[in-house]
Amino acid sequence: MFDTLIKWAGFVKLSHTLFALPFALAAMVVAARDNAGWPGWRTFALILAAMVCARTCAMAFNRIADRKFDAMNPRTAMRHLPAGQISLVSAVMLYALSGAGLVAAAYFLNPLCFYLSPVALFLICFYSLTKRFTDYTHVWLGLALALAPLGAWLAVRGGFDLLPLRNGVVSLAHSGFLAILLAVAVVFWLIGFDIIYALQDYEFDKRVGLRSLVVAWGPLNALRAAFIAHLVMILLLVAFGLLSRFRLAYLIGMMLIASSLLFEHWLARRRSLNWVQNAFFRLNALVSLVFLVVTVCEVVFPGFRLARP
C-alpha cells in the first residue's frame, strides 16, 4: 500500500503542491485577520482539500494530455504513463475523482466557490494544451496557480470587498484587493520560474513543434524575461506588504525571497541543467514557504510588527 501511494504521489508530483499551497494559506490568514488569522478548522480543512484535489486533477490531466510527447522526450520517457507503471484508465479515473473532489469541497465552502469551481477546473486543466498553440503557455500556468490565493480568500470571505470599512474608515489592510494583488504576484512568479524550467526541453520542444517563450525568443532572451517577471513579482509582494501594514518580519522575508530568486537566476546562467529538478524545486518551495511564514507572523503574532494595522 505504501509503495502504491508513493507511486501515485510521484505521478501527480504531489510535492509540487508546495508551490501554490503556501500562497493559498497566506491569503487565508490575511482574509481571516479579524479572527487572528484563523478561519476555523472546517474552512481550513476544506481549503486544504480543494487545493490538493485541484492540483491532483491538473497534474493528472497534464500527464494524460502529454503522454505521447513524454514518451518521445528522453527526459520524461520514464514517467508513469509512457513507462506503463500506471494505466491510462487509472489516470483518467484519478483525474475525474479529484475534479469531483474539488467541486465537492467548494460546495461545502460557500455558494460562490461552488459556482466558480467549474471555471477553476477549466483553467487549471487548459494550461496543459496551451503549449500546442501559444508561446505564452507560462502565463496560462501562472493564471492557473493564481487561483490558489483567490480561492482561499473567497473561501473565507465569500466575496471581494474592495473598500471595507473598519470603525467607519476604509481599511485597505482588509481589502479584497490584497488577494488580487497576491494573485498577480503569483502569475509573474510562475512566468519566471516556468521559463527557467522550460530550458530543459528547449531542443526537444523546438524539434517537435511545442511552443514556449524559450522556443520563441531563445534561451538568453527568455531568461531576461524571466528575470523581469521575478522583479515585478518582488515589487508586487512589497506593495502587498505595505497595504497590509506589515513590518519587520515581512521585510526579512522579502530579503530572503529576493535572495533565493537571484540565486536561482545565477544558477540558470552559470550551471548545467541537471540542477533544475532538485535545486530549482527547493528554491521555489523556499520562496512560497518563507512568504507563508512571514505572513503568518505578521497577522497572528503582533509582536513581530513594529505597528499594529
Image: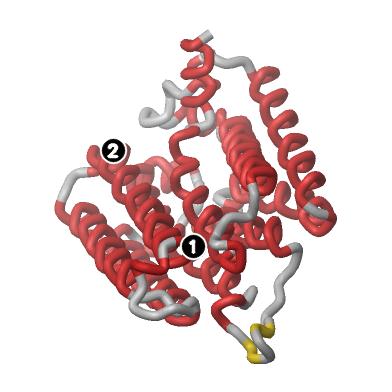
Q: Secondary structure at mark 1?
A: helix
What residue is rendered at 64% in x and 74% in y?
176
Q: Is residue 289 left or right of residue 14?
A: left
Image coordinates of residue 39 in percent, x first then y, are 63, 55
Front-lying residue, 6 or 30: 30
Q: Locate residue 259 relative to residue 208 in the image: left or right.
A: left
Q: Earlier in the sequence, mark 1 or mark 2?
A: 1
Q: Is residue 205 visible?
A: yes
Q: Amino acid at mark 1?
A: Val
Q: Give the Cα distance between marks 1 and 2.
A: 21 Å
Instruction: Give residue 281's quadrant in the image.
Output: top left
Q: Which residue is labeled 1 in the image?
A: 186
Secondary structure category for the residue under label 2: helix
Q: Nearer the viewer, residue 246 or 284?
A: 246
Residue visible at 64% across and 23% down?
91
Across and down, in percent, residue 75 comes to 37, 31
In the drawing, does residue 219 fall left or right of residue 42? left
Task: Return the x and y of residue 301 as percentages of the image width and height.
Answer: 41, 62
Q: Pinpoint residue 229: horizontal percent, then vertical percent.
A: 39, 69
Please report the residue visible at 54 percent of the width from the left and 21 percent of the height from the top: 8
Q: Residue furthest bottom?
A: 169
Q: Within 10 angstroms of label 1, few (less than 14), some, or many (20 or more) residues?
A: many
Front one among 47 and 235 = 47
Mark 2: give few (<14), some (14-19) or many (20+) Cα within 10 Å.
few
**Mark number, residue 278:** 2
Q: Is residue 221 visible?
A: no
